[in-house]
């Protein structure tokens, strides 16, 4: 058993059943022990797949966070790092205390449940406008570009105080980052342009302050220029892509079974519970940010040495039958709020409350406007997949009604 555990594997990403983990991950989860993992840059580390170990590890201060993913090659990683020119100093997701605490405090007030609730009316307006446009155009429609993607991109533009017409500045780099065919040269060019844009936005807010999050960050004096630009870049990236895919794949999961879409439409008042279960079921972000052990330690009988990397499969953990019985089913009876879709501990997603509201408003609005909505192509034929960054997404979502 120990010999098998210590033989490095490559992280499996191909979901054979749309929403369930790859069989290899399910088998590892059932085994209940960490497994040696081969990283694309040549290093080896550990992979954790069970819910209890995952929840414990991502909140364990004996592990630090590092800016890399197991499937990203060293050349691409280096090209992006060179292109952004030190802006990673403002990436709160890749910082540990005390820097993490300071950076998160600089923006945290805008992401509390109360402040997010104040934005609900604006999100409802955005959703209604998009639904109006879809209805005017008539069927069929592709809900990724027509609905799922514009909602969070417009919300983050309003939150940061930039025009919606600027969305190409962050949509294009994200597409490049998530495209497995991207070359290091393409990644470098996209992120160099993105870095220039966020510097320009920060300068604009300093010269022309407004009532928005970016102005708050500039005027607080808590962050230096590189941190301001880096935080802005991270908010743009994390503020749209994962939520867009949660909306698109949430629609797909509901439409895949006719009775499920009808049940959701009839239970609109319980949208929060539906979204929590869908977040667990979908597990859009498939892996945690990679951790590195600060000291020699033991994880349920497995010795992990100081300096070794550990990656957590959030997908596998959210489908661990020991934590969520019959995990391949969408069930409101299980009470899924303990899921790890947003992580856990101090690095739990800063925008979790905003993402929840966007998803709830989007799905409820769509079901109310189009109760007869259905897929315009077989679910098995839709282009879905996981990129090297570990984000499960739909490239297209054709529907009709």
Image (tube, rainbow, N blue to C red):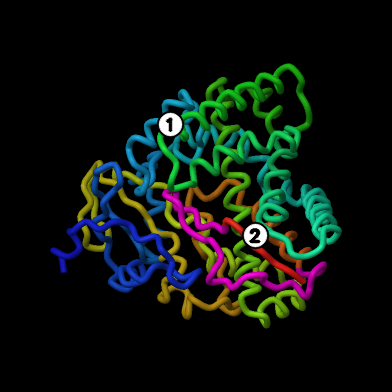
Q: Residue at x 48, y 80 (%)?
A: 326
304 or 280: nearer the eye? 280
Query: How many discs appear?
Result: 2
The magenta segment is 367-394
Q: Residue at x 58, y 46 (%)?
A: 350
389 in the magenta segment: yes
Left or right of residue 101: residue 200: right
Label 1, secondary structure: give it.
Answer: helix
Report crowding for label 1: few under 14, some 14 to 19, many 20 or more residues within 10 A (C-alpha): few
In this rendering, would 112 be left or right of 118?
A: left
- Residue 360 higher or lower than 205, as above or below: below
Q: Which of pointers 2 and 1 indicates the residue nearer the eye?
A: 1
Give residue 203's position: percent from left, percent from top.
Answer: 66, 19
Q: In which quarter of the image is residue 217?
A: top right
Q: In which quarter of the image is the C terminus?
A: bottom right
Q: In this view, does 115 lie to the left or right of 342?
A: right
Residue placed farthest to the bottom in the image? 259
Residue most extreme to the top: 207
> As displayed, is residue 231 above or below residue 138?
above
Q: Does the magenta stretch include residue 368?
A: yes
Where's residue 288, x and y in %? 43, 52
What residue sits 38% from the left and 56% below the top?
Answer: 312
Residue 185 numbered mark, or none: 1
Q: How far apart are marks 2 and 1 (CA)?
A: 31 Å
Foreground: 201 or 15? Answer: 15
| Image location of residue 41, percent across then percent down | 29, 42
| 2 or 1: tag closer to the N-terminus | 1
* Residue at image mark 2: 247
């Amino acid at each position: 058993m120990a010999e098998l555990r210590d033989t490095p594997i490559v992280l499996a990403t191909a979901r054979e059943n749309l929403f369930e983990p790859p069989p290899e991950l399910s088998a590892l989860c059932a085994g209940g022990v960490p497994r040696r993992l081969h990283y694309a840059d040549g290093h080896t580390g550990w992979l954790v797949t069970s819910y209890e170990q995952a929840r414990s590890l991502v909140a364990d201060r004996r592990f630090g966070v590092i800016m890399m993913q197991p499937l990203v090659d060293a050349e691409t990683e280096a090209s992006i790092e060179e292109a952004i020119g030190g802006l990673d100093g403002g990436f709160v997701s890749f910082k540990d205390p005390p820097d993490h605490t300071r950076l998160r405090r600089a923006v945290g007030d805008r992401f509390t449940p109360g402040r997010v609730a104040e934005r609900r009316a604006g999100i409802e307006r955005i959703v209604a406008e998009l639904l109006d446009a879809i209805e005017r155009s008539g069927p069929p429609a592709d809900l990724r570009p027509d609905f799922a993607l514009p909602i969070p991109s417009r919300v983050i533009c309003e939150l940061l105080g930039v025009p919606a017409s600027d969305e190409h500045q962050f949509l294009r780099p994200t597409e490049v980052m998530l495209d497995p065919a991207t070359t290091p040269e393409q990644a470098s060019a996209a992120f160099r342009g993105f870095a220039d844009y966020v510097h320009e936005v920060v300068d604009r807010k300093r010269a022309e302050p407004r009532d928005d999050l970016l102005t708050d960050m500039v005027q607080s004096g808590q962050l230096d220029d590189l941190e301001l630009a880096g935080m802005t870049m991270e908010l743009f990236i994390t503020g749209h892509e994962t939520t867009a895919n949660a909306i698109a794949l949430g629609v797909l999961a509901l439409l895949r079974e006719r009775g499920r879409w009808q049940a959701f439409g009839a239970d609109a008042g319980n949208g929060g519970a539906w979204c929590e279960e869908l977040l667990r079921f979908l597990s859009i972000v498939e892996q945690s940010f990679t951790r590195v052990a600060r000291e020699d330690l033991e994880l349920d009988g497995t010795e992990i040495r100081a300096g070794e990397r550990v990656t957590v499969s959030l997908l596998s953990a959210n489908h661990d039958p020991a934590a969520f019985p019959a995990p391949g089913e969408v069930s409101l009876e299980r009470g899924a709020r303990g899921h790890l879709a947003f992580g856990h501990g101090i690095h739990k997603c800063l925008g979790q409350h905003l993402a929840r509201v966007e998803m709830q408003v989007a799905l409820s609005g769509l079901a109310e406007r189009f109760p007869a909505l259905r897929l315009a192509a077989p679910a098995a034929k839709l282009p879905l997949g996981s990129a090297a960054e570990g984000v499960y997404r739909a490239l297209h979502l054709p529907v009709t009604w």
